[in-house]
Amino acid sequence: MECSKCRSEAVITQSYSGLSLCMRHLISDIESKAKKEIRKKGGLASSERIYLKGGDDYRLYALRIFVSALFLKRTDIIFVTSEDEATTVFSSETLDDAACGLLDAVLKGRTADYLEAKKKRVIAPLSVIPAEEVYLYAKAHGWKGDGVSSSSTKEFLDAFSKGRPGTKYALKNTADFLEDI
């Protein structure tokens, strides 16, 4: 399979876009989408204090790689080691996490959680990127650990999304809408 952009060997085919991408173009695509999500959430002001939130897995690893490259030359941004010290929290949530989170909340009758005001501004730059792509991004940057984990909700959503590639994006957009109410 060839990359749709350069004819190199493709590492993934995005069902939602129809593109087959090599690693170089996948990385570029991921970084472009993540930057756009940061801008959509209001960007970062000077002297922001950022906390990177997530488990010790490929998602947080990928977020750290992305954020370190993005803010390498920004001396006005401070990274903190405690969420309490932060003005903005960067979450390692992927598209799959965002979609499953809302679906779980709906199934458990807890959608009101999305309507509660957040104590801190939270930005999840990877929340517009499928978990499989985030895992490939992490691997391309040296991740040696485990990959995408599964849950019954994720398995259901993956199966349901096979013929409907926009499902996870629709759930993520709905979650964003609920948080903005």
Image: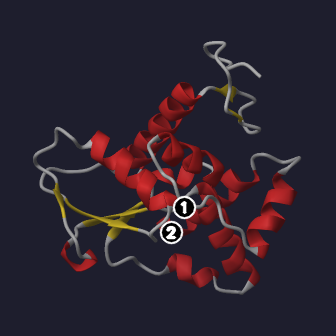
163 on left or right of 31: right
Mark 1 residue element? helix
Q: Residue furthest top?
A: 7
Is residue 167 depicted above or below 26 in this figure?
below
| Residue 12 spot, x, y in % from top left | 69, 35
Q: Residue at x 46, y 71 (%)?
A: 55
Circle 1/circle 2 CB separation < 8 Å: yes
Where residue 84 appears, x then y in whole percent?
23, 79
Q: Secondary structure at mark 2?
A: helix
Q: Which mark is residue 179?
A: 2
Say what amino acid the circle numbered 1 marks.
Answer: Asp
Amino acid found under the numbered disc labelled 2 = Glu
Q: Quadrant of residue 89?
A: bottom left
Where residue 176 is drawn, which disc sits there? 1
Corner quadrant of residue 75: top left
Q: Indicate the position of residue 171 as horizontal and vertical percent values.
A: 68, 60
Q: Quadrant of residue 5?
A: top right
